[in-house]
Image (cartoon, grey):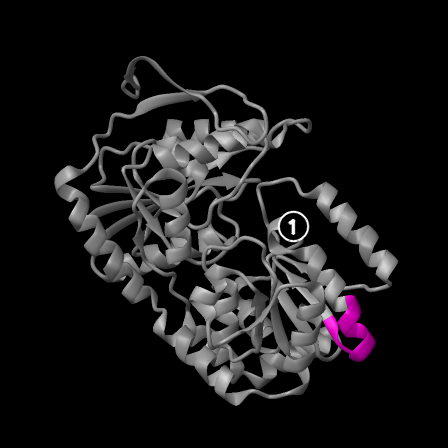
């Protein structure tokens, strides 16, 4: 089967990690897989080495003008990927995010989580990326239920995989773990995903300030954070609050892929206070490494991590659960976490994807795509959808 998987970035965000791992597992299963993406900032390849069995098509995406807004950047991203992509050679076109789904039109779409944007361009992009695909996959039942409740769409549920062996091996790499502990200066709580609203960064900061009163030697380490969106205002609020609280977390930014497993394995606890998630891949990696996990008390995270994680609803709860994880060993929960992570393999995820693709082939959508334009609308309203004259996109040159 000839499969195109599309993403919007080469950077190490969860959706990109998912896309590459799925592509490699599909190729290992004997499929002909090509990954398409945008090369932002001069990138000519992905953040990590990709198995040569997977073809890569990185569409150059030069930086825009300094005053370019997020909405303008989103529109330009869609236009450039659309101009470069030819659906003709593929049996399955599978988009992993709203930008790539808008670029290719009717496709299979994985909805990792459902966002709620107020920027008109982003709201329109999100809406089209849900309504235009002819088939949907969700990485958890909770998100699939949101899709059914909000849009009346049925989605196949295929959970994420995790590179269990890689993170489990890091737990046994005493040299690598010691190197991180030495660099950081002792015990630390880790979170991966950067500083942004969806990740609950302000709540984690409040929890850390409370934790420091009990465990002054423990540091908060924040890794990752590569994103298309502009969170400067939120980041400024976070930095101002950190100064008020008198705490100084260590912000690593994007960590090289080779060093990430030992960074995770060396942590004394992993905090995952996200306000919106579809699965929690970084949290599952922490379980694979045997690290105590504390997550936000959300239905989706109960679905995925019940029995393997501690749950916290407020910063006070989070501080308390972190303190318990740091001071009270819990071998049964840790063993349950390792067992859970070992069950989530990319081989199994690829098998389910192939079964789903094959179920769709008799009704495969045509390459021609309906053009949908949207009008800007006030925040909180869905955009009005307008179909162009003729209804079909003109042939590509």
Provide the residue span drawn in magenta. Answer: 209-219
Going by the image, does 59 lie left or right of 132?
A: right
Q: Position of residue 92 (x, y in %)?
A: 24, 43
Q: Residue at x 32, y 56 (%)?
A: 157
Q: Residue furthest left?
A: 362
The residue to which callout 1 is attached is 196
Is residue 216 inside the magenta stretch? yes
Q: Position of residue 79 (x, y in %)?
A: 44, 26
Q: Residue at x 30, y 38 (%)?
A: 107
Q: Residue at x 18, y 44 (%)?
A: 360
- Where residue 108 sits, quadrant-wise, is top left
Up the image or down, 394 lies above or below 213; here it is above
Up the image or down, 375 lies above or below 299; here it is above
User: What count of labels does the image hold?
Assistant: 1
Q: Position of residue 96 (x, y in %)?
A: 39, 45
Q: Residue furthest front?
A: 149
- Where residue 203 sits, quadrant-wise, is bottom right
Secondary structure type for disc 1:
loop
Q: Is residue 312 visible?
A: yes
């Amino acid at each position: 089967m000839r499969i195109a998987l599309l993403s919007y970035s080469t950077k190490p965000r969860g959706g990109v990690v998912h896309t590459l791992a799925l592509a490699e597992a599909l190729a290992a299963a004997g499929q002909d897989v090509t990954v398409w993406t945008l090369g932002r900032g001069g990138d000519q390849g992905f953040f990590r080495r990709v198995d040569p069995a997977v073809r890569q098509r990185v569409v150059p995406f030069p930086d825009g003008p300094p005053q370019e807004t997020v909405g303008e950047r989103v529109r330009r991203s869609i236009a450039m990927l659309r101009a470069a992509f030819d659906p003709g050679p593929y049996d399955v076109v599978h988009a992993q995010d709203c930008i790539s789904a808008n670029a290719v039109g009717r496709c299979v779409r994985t909805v990792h989580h459902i966002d709620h944007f107020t920027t008109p361009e982003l709201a329109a992009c999100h809406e089209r990326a849900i309504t235009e695909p002819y088939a949907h996959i969700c990485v958890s039942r909770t998100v699939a239920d949101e899709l059914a409740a909000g849009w009346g769409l049925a989605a196949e549920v295929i959970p994420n995989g995790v590179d269990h062996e890689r993170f489990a091996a890091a737990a046994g790499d005493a040299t690598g773990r010691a190197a991180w502990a030495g660099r950081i200066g002792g015990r630390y709580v880790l979170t991966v995903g950067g500083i942004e609203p969806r990740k609950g960064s302000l709540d984690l900061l409040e929890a850390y300030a409370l934790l420091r009163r009990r465990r002054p030697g423990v540091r908060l380490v924040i890794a990752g954070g590569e994103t298309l969106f502009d969170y400067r205002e939120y980041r400024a609020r976070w930095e101002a609050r950190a100064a008020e609280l008198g705490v100084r977390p260590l912000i690593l930014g994007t960590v090289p892929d080779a060093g990430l497993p030992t960074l995770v394995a060396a942590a004394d606890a992993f905090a995952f206070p996200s306000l919106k998630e579809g699965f929690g891949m970084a949290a599952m990696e922490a379980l694979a490494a045997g690290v105590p996990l504390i997550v936000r008390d959300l239905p989706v995270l109960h679905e995925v991590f019940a029995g393997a994680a501690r749950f916290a609803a407020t910063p006070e709860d989070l501080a308390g659960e972190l303190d318990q994880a740091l001071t009270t060993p819990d071998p049964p929960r840790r063993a349950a976490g390792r067992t859970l992570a070992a069950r989530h393999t990319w081989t199994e995820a690829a098998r389910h994807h192939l079964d789903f693709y094959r179920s769709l082939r008799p009704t495969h959508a045509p390459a021609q795509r309906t053009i949908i334009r949207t009008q800007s609308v006030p925040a909180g309203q869905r955009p009005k959808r307008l179909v162009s004259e003729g209804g079909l996109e003109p042939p590509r040159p």
